[in-house]
Amino acid sequence: MTAHATAASHAAHDDRPFIRKYVFSTDHKTIGIQFLFLSLFFLLVGGLLAMGIRWQLGFPGQPMPLGGWLPQSVAPGGVVAPKTYNSLVTMHGTFMIFFAVMPLLVGVFANYLIPLKIGAPDMAFPRLNMWSFWLMIPSGGLMLASLFVLGGSSAAGWTVYAPLSGTPDYSGVHLGQQLWCVSIVIFGLSSLLGSVNYITTVINLRAPGMHWFRLPLSVWALFITAVLAILAVPILAGAVIMLLFDQTIGTHFFQPDVGGQPLMWQHLFWFFGHPEVYILILPAMGIASDIIANGARKPIFGYSSMVYAMIAIAFLGFIVWGHHMFQSGMNPTLASTFMVSTIVIAVPSAIKVFNWLGTLWRGSIHFTTPMLNALAFVAMFIIGGLSGIFMASTPVDMYIHGTYFIVAHIHYVLFGGSLFAVFAGIYFWYPKMFGRRMSERWGKVHFVLTFVFYNLTFFPMHILGVGGEMRRIYDPTVYDFLRPLQPINVFITVNAFLLGLSQLVFAVNFIGSLFKGEKAERNPWHDTGLEWTTASPPPHGNFPETPHVYHGPYEYSVPGMAEDFLPVNTPPAKEVA
Amino acid sequence: MEATEHRTPNYVAIWGMLAVLTVVEVAVVYLRLPRRLMVVSLVFLALWKALLVALYFMHLRFEPKRLLYIVLAPLPLAVILVFAVMHGFRGP
Amino acid sequence: MTAHAAAPPLGHDAPPQGGVGVYTQKVGMWVFLVSEVMFFTALIGSYIILRWGTGAQWPEPRSVLAIPVTALNTFILICSSVSMVKAYAAATRDDQAGLKRWLLLTVLGGATFVSVQAYEYHHLIEKGFLPSSGLFGSAFYTMTGFHGFHVTCGVISMIWVTIRAFRGKYAGGNYRGVETIGLYWHFVDLVWIILFTIVYLI
């Protein structure tokens, strides 16, 4: 069946019933928007859990505001109990990584953008795509449910190290951990189904003229991310299943008493876990590239090296996993090999950073909200990457592993990197998705507030970490050597709350603009991408006629042209002004 | 866009080979060969069978090279994972 | 920006940009199978690591497991792979009778394999060999259990494909659905070839 033959018929008469159009939809755009609402909800959940963590760290032993509403077993007298604190830390990480950032970057942008940007009417397997979204519902539901079961949710960190995670007698957590495992397996399936779609679509459904090296970097990034997911997520699934069996049917994979190996959990988990962090950053890099080229009115500097750098990052990302385990007692020779590979992976990342800078150099920079967020992405990613260099060196990591230095790094790359890119992407593609514009003024207010409070929250964590404050501890003030650092914890907590409150600006802008936003034209950002050649929002089937691509993705400020951008589907005859 | 036209392999012959290889595998076990030799033979025989299934039943022998690259991609990673972790446990 | 006026004819006749030169469902199935390779790598890799990497106590597999029965079962699964590829060949030739016959035999082969496995599990459990029986028990049941789960899903899918074949959905040389499920089926056979050797024989 030629998907293209049906494009015209789809666009002409869309007579799907309501439930097929908005609920059980196979249209990639609807699915992308469903992922958007779902993941923004989980971003809120993760954020609230973070507020709980920060309260306890800033004001240990003090009753939390609204803490009285929690059950006494969880928060006696409104004070976060130690086991509850472990749950908060675990579930904050779990929700943010699996249910907020991954769906935001991949579920939203891969689904929404790929077919549009390559000129296809939809994904290769639209029904499978629908399943990919709907599997997130039981997965997310089970994970939320685990917060409320007897014994509490998983409390072994988002990395659920064995044997703590596999032994209810140690952790006090029974059903909660099992629900975590089942939820993650279902999530893995959702992720895999999505990735099969993204990969197959990019390989086989590109419009005529859309050669590989004419793909926008966002599509390259999402494609490479999907390849990472296909190769890494199944390892997580296998490991989590083994962990689940250890807890339920009495297997001994990670139980030392019968010869099981806790260290093997760490190897398996991080073999997935490291590619996972590249899954969390590559789409952000791709989105930032598209937006920076657009905002600077210049082609991306070094397009092909950007592609090769992403491929190098993805490949190298598979051979660095041991750097998460330097303190585990692992074989030191093996550790050295990981140190080398980890230092090497800084190179392609740096190439990308220099290329973004090269793009901005002598550009005609338009400081729109998406551009501001994309620029913040680059700057914060640099800081996050620099802290990575310290951690890559095993002797240094011996001191800073498991401290707040790591927490600082994580949040600089995940919030400073991924989340700013997510904001950039939402502000940028909102007009295409909803046919309305978000308020530029309030977008800028949100940006400034977020940028300021975010840095005030997370930068001091570098200092805490080097000062020796360990992560995942319930009360730093029980340690004499940490007590002098407590004012920093209070400072961070206050700024964290302000950061959280600042997101209300985004929420109001996002929701309000859905109803009251200024109607968007077809191409408000004067962008070269194919998605901007069709209506806002695009019809079912995307393009009335299959587009034909003649140019690379970033033809901005082409000399001699009347307009400062050249859409990729402009035929050669029309180029001359 | 189609797979290239190719002469249909003799599936019955492949089936025969697979049957014979399976018998040989079981025989190797019961022959009580020296451990090293037995392990090497079994791995070799298993790989041979796997290749027959992959190349002929799954038609990889006749597919475009690009598809082969996709299929081969996980194999080095699998080897790296197992080797690195084994090395980690057993030492240099 | 109206750019279509001088463009060449588009739409129905314009071919998409060539991919790997293989039809979409096949690409999708192979990508999915790549993920399955990684999934079994986690399980089989763990077995290899635990058995030969950690110096753990490990019984001789043939003292616990029934090799002859499993060897026969391996042969049955291989036969079902042959019947599957014969079904595919029949579909390419539009031999509908052959297609239906070979698909039914494949379902039969797969169902037999699962039944024999289930019988083997029952026998082992009666003997006292459980998932909690040391590392070997843990790894054995997890690996063969997930393989059996994959075969079961395969049998269910195969039944569905057979029903579609009887309804004439693969008539007129329309073989793609048969080839696609065939790839999954052969993969499951391939994993078993490796599992049988590593777990039962070595």
Image (cartoon, coloured by chain):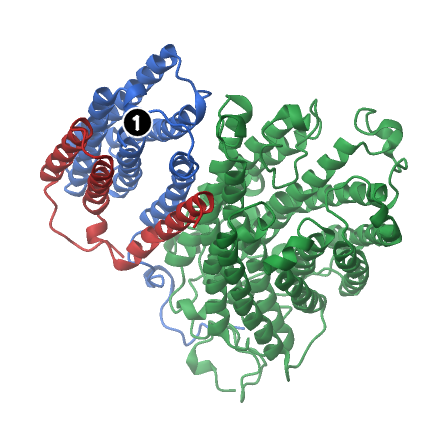
Chain colours: A green, B red, C blue
Residue most toward the top? C126
Q: Nearer the viewer, residue C72 or A423?
A: C72
Look at label 1 and name its amino acid. Answer: Ile
> Position of A377 compared to A28: left or right?
right
Q: Which residue is mark 1?
A: C159
Q: Is residue C83 above or below residue C73?
A: below
Residue drawn 79% across the image and 28% down it = A74
Q: Is residue C42 above or below residue C200?
A: below
**Location of residue A200 in the rendering, given as x and y in whole percent from the top left corner:** 40, 52
Residue most toward the bottom? A560
Q: Nearer the viewer, residue A532 or A451?
A: A451
Residue A431 visible from this viewpoint: no
Residue A66 placement: quadrant: top right
Q: Is residue A11 above or below residue A67?
A: below
Number of on-image labels: 1
Q: Classify 10 Å Cα crowding around label 1: few (below 14), some (14-19), many (20 and above).
A: some
**Location of residue A512 in the rendering, given as x and y in whole percent from the top left corner:** 76, 52
Residue drawn 66% across the image and 81% down it = A364
Q: Nearer the viewer, residue B80 or A52?
A: B80
**Location of residue C40 in the rendering, given as x and y in whole percent from the top left corner:** 39, 38
Q: Secondary structure at mark 1?
A: helix
Residue drawn 68% across the image and 30% down it = A153
> Position of A521 compared to A457: left or right?
left
> Position of A551 compared to A84: left or right?
left
Q: Is residue C33 above or below residue A417?
A: above
> Position of A505 compared to A147: left or right?
right
Residue A417 visible from this viewpoint: yes
Q: Nearer the viewer, residue B23 or A379?
A: B23
